[in-house]
Image (tube, coloured by chain):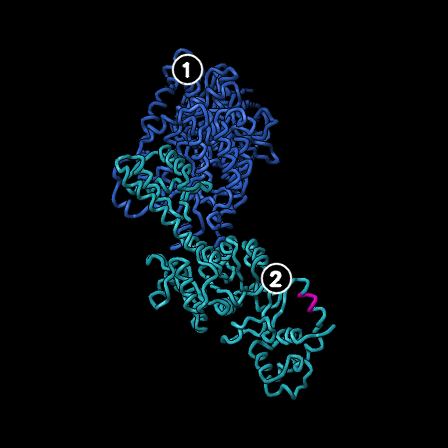
Amino acid sequence: MELKENDYAHWLINVPEIGNISAIKLIESGMSCRDVFESRASDLGGILSHNQINALFKSRTSWDFHAEKEKLRSKDIRFISRLHPDFPGKLLDIPSAPFGIYVRGKLPDLGKPSVAIVGARMCSDYGRYMARQFGRDLALAGVQVISGMARGVDGISQNAALLAGGTSFAVLGCGADICYPEENRKVYEALLESGGIISEFPPGTKPIANFFPMRNRIISALSDVLLVIEARKKSGTSITVDTALEQGKEVLAVPGRVTDRLSDGCNNLISQGAGIAIRAEDVLDRIRTECGTGPAEKSGGMAADKSDDEDTLSFEVDDEKDVENPEITLDREILEIVDIIPISMSSIMEELYRRGREVSVPVLMNRLLELTGSGRIIQNGAYYRRIVG
Amino acid sequence: MFSSVTSGAVSGIISYLMQVEVDVSDGLPGFNMVGFMSSEVREAGDRVKVALRNAGSRVPPAKITVNLSPVGIRKAGVVIDLPVAVGIMASMGEIHAESLEKTMILGELGLDGEVKAVKGVLPIVKKAREEGYKRVILPKSNAREGAVVSGIKVIGVTSLQETALYLNADEGEKDLLIPPSYVDVQKLFEEAEKMDETLDFADINGQAGLKRAAEIAAAGFHHLLLIGPPGAGKSMVAKRMPTIMPPLSLEESLEVSTIYSVAGMLGENEALVTKRPFVSTHHLVTDTALVGGGTVPRPGIISLAHRGVLFLDEMPEFSRTKLDMLRQPLEDRKVHIVRNRGTYTYPADFQLIGALNPCPCGYYPDRNKCRCTPNEIKRYLGHISGPVFDRVDICVEAPKVDIADLAAGSRHAGESSRSIRERVLRAREVQKKRFEGTALKFNSEMTPRDIEIYCRLSPREESYLENVFCNMDLSARAYHKILRVARTIADIDGSEDIRLIHLSEAVSYRITDGQYCFQREE
């Protein structure tokens, strides 16, 4: 078997005691990874510590190139060191850059714009909705969505992007062969189809809390713009924001209500000068100014907005026409209450009651049926919500 | 000399008659009790001896033998003080033996000869009447309870002396000495009706959705689950449930009273349970207290809720094993308690109302307050096992109440329990007519086969349900539940057919179906 430089690089980064910094130092000293493998202690003396050299020599004898290569191949994972031509240029010059990455599926296309969408794991219905909207609209505009495939905002936005036929990439804090959290299994599989899974940890690495903040720098580095959907004041998302700013990336935040604790992070970012993202178009604009490259096609996001407007428009016409008709005004109130966030029948009743309108359940059911029949709202199990976009 | 006194006892909830045979004969003085009894029953001997002496009757220095027949039944938790005392007096000739004919005697004795209340009077007196007894002598505080049984003379006594006096009196004078107790059952029920006014659905401000769900649950005897944050009024609704259920019928009242009588929970001088039971328990209840049992078997909480409401607040806090114990009673409407001394069956036809928070902290999906992870929520709700969830037809969300609304005060009173109950009664009437000649009583009891017969849908409704079925990813069981509830809603509406509006309302009571906490996660 012929061993390539990349295989030696794979060995080097897997030597215990040697991390990204030491490995990069070694190759910057002019040695190739093969040179390191064949070196003598005196060659390395100036760069590595005594311990590291011992570990390196020990691993030289125990490392089985063939078996390791086979292991990667069986798991369909590639190792790409920073010396490899495929290595994403965006990752080369960031602070504490990775020496190499493991990839399952594809790597982001550097010619296309990419946006990182991040946010709270335990997000609100609002966050969920916004994540979905942005994920979908950006994907429709041809933007690659990069995120951490975590529970909540991450997974939802990636899922939405994939469902819209876009591409998305997940940077994991565990081995690329492990799907964590398990509930995002569907997203994981879809990512393999149209996107990729990236990790700097060797396959089989278990998800450990300490590893997760580390991947954030890769998420922000791979993207052109960082979009924060929803975050608490102190959260993992703030780490991603910090790394993005460190890397000189633009940060956009989706505003929320001041009283919502889950919007504190975003509102805070905005007050500190982050850009405001209200719709996908805001993000696209920022990408254009950032990299001078327009997104492939920008009609998608706009189309969604337009239908939104139409919806509210037709609905206002109704108001003016039949203010007198009590049924219509009841419909109007129901439509005000039934929003993008699914709501149960008993909650609609309570909300109507709060507005001083008392209706019986059969009357309400009747209206809800009509409204679902005419396509204004949809019934999803025991919950109702507005149709948007 | 030998004498025999009839007494009675209960085993489980079945009552039986017992002969207390006493023989006083020459020989080495002593007191001996036989007849397969537990040690606490044996203690009666000492009490009786002292009570007799204090009542002015001398216990003779003779060999006294007491036998409890039939010896085939183990007597545990049985009180035989008064019959034994009367038996000894009869053996000594202090009481005329012929006055004991066709007479049953029940009662516990104090050391001073006072007669104290016993448990299980109602079923025992009923048994005595069935066996053709003419008269029962029992503690005065139990007299009203016994008097509910018609066709038998119930004599309440307060002391041993009084009992002897009564038994020795001439037949004609007896009624003058202690008039037989009498209870006007009709009047009892009327009074109960009037007393029912402390709790009313009108007390609840708003929450029309919950009230409606309660109404449907009451009409079709569906089990009900209320899910909502703390302070949404879940317990308020549950507590008012009995006020909209049909009043207890005499037949039902006798069943319930029997259970309470056996459990010793009928109050002093209380004749019958006339109000629908509302029993709530908290999650640290022991297994035995919940389903019944114990060394002297006693009905558990679920039997005390027979024909009424069993309210479990904070349901996921109950251990899973406890909730799973409810599975069989929910299915069979009675509970079998199997012990090595025998099997006891208690009725347990209750309506389950469970209240629970949507997550451990109680505030999901309000993410301002709730930081529970999806897994935590899943685990929390997982305490309630699928089969228990499966037996609940109606699940409704209790929306949170704003403090501001409470402060605004009741703008106006909501609908009163009385008018809700009228609709419930009407719906029950419809069900009664529909299920005439079948074993069914309520819509909730319909099997899938019955549903096919009684819940025919027209094509439009069918296609709607099919659509829901696919969208919600329902199980066949949930499908049937929707139909059962829709049937009840149609009955309340007075509609022969199940229409779209009934179906879609029934669907809105299925908030736990599919993935309750994840269905909004896309």
Query: Alpha-carbon neighbours of circle 1 within 10 Å: few (<14), some, or many (≥20)?
Result: some
**Left or right of residue A6: residue A218:** left
Q: Chain A is drawn in which colour?
A: cyan
Give whichever of B129, B308 is nearer the camera: B308
How far apart, in angstroms, are the residues tagged by discs 1 and 2? 97 Å
Q: Is the magenta stretch mostly helix, strand or loop?
A: helix
Looking at the rendered structure, the kind of residue marked 1 is Ala
Assign a secondary structure to mark 2.
loop
Mark 1 lies on residue: B169
What span is in magenta?
A68-72
Looking at the rendered structure, the kind of residue marked 2 is Asp
Query: Alpha-carbon neighbours of circle 2 within 10 Å: few (<14), some, or many (≥20)?
Result: many
Give whichever of B355, B116 is nearer the camera: B355
Q: Position of residue B294 (x, y in %)?
A: 53, 38
The chain coloured blue in the image: B
| Subunit that carries the residue with mark 1 | B
**Left or right of residue B387: residue B308:** left
Between circles 1 and 2, the one closer to the viewer is 2
User: What residue is at 42 percent from the left and 12 percent from the top?
Assistant: B170
| Subunit that carries the residue with mark 2 | A
Image quadrant assignment for residue A325 = top left
Give whichever of A178, A309 is nearer the camera: A309
Mark 2 lies on residue: A177
